[in-house]
Image (cartoon, grey):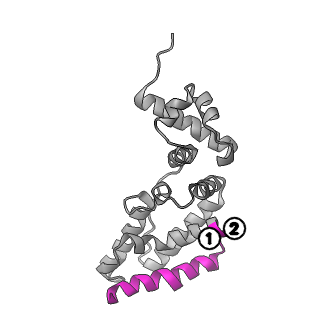
């Protein structure tokens, strides 16, 4: 007789089933019924943990994505460009397509998108900006979560609102040179 899973074991099984569904079918094919069947549980167990398929999809995506270390080239401009280039490659990949579908389905709900200052992405940009402050490239006033993450938000915007399969490198350079660096520099004057 099989023991009924509870708590962390059940949650892990549900998340793995959601990861498998995302991998096999993308976000469009992710249903609570299919995840429940794959996890060997019922939909109620899923809904007790995640209110809808977007929340479940985002939780599963976080299981799939791996944290990356921010670059440290010795230059804020080069760090920002390299980070945007990495993000662009990721968002252009099959895994990135899942994220893009999730972002579109979330409809700008920032709690779901991970655009809070305490999220991993924001923390990485704050680390890069903190290094720039330590090197004297930026004023301490620039260390603000919204300032730090504006470049990645603009990149996401290119994918979500324009629906492009990949963002051209000249747009990444423009985001850094025309928006991000002037914003960081302008914080010293404010």
Highlighted range, magenta: 161-190
Query: Which quadrant holds the C terminus?
Result: bottom left
Residue 132: image location, x then y, percent: 36, 77
Quarter of the figure with residue 117: bottom left
Whether the magenta-drawn stretch holds residue 170 is answered as: yes
Which residue position holds label 1?
A: 158
Sequence-earlier tag: 1 or 2: 1
**Residue that lies at the very extreme toward the bottom in this rendered image:** 189
How far apart in space, not on screen, are marks 1 and 2 (Cα)? 7 Å
- Mark 2, Cα crowd under 10 Å, few <14 / some 14-19 / many 20+, is few
Q: Report which residue position mark 2 lands on.
A: 164
Query: Is residue 167 rendered magenta in the image?
Result: yes
Instruction: Give the residue furthest to the top.
Output: 1
Q: Give the left or right position of residue 164, taking residue 178 as reference.
A: right
50 w.r.t. 42: above or below:
below
Q: Note whether 23 is above or below 127 in the view shown.
A: above
The answer to whether residue 13 is visible is no
* Circle on res. 80: none
């Amino acid at each position: 007789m099989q023991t009924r899973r509870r708590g962390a074991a059940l949650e892990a099984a549900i998340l793995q089933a959601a990861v498998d569904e995302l991998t096999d079918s993308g976000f469009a094919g992710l249903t609570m019924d299919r995840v429940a069947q794959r996890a060997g549980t019922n939909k109620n167990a899923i809904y007790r943990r995640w209110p809808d398929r977007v929340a479940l999809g985002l939780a599963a995506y976080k299981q799939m994505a791996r944290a990356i270390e921010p670059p440290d080239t010795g230059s804020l401009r080069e760090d920002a460009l390299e980070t945007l280039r990495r993000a662009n490659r990721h968002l252009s990949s099959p895994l990135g397509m899942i994220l893009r579908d999730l972002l579109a389905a979330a409809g700008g709900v920032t709690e779901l998108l991970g655009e809070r200052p305490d999220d991993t992405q924001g923390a990485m940009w704050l680390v890069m900006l903190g290094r720039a402050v330590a090197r004297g490239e930026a004023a301490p006033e620039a260390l603000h979560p919204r300032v730090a993450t504006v470049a990645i938000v603009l990149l996401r915007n290119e994918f979500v609102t324009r629906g492009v399969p990949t963002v051209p490198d000249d747009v990444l350079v423009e985001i850094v040179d025309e928006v991000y660096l002037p914003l960081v520099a302008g914080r010293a004057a404010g």
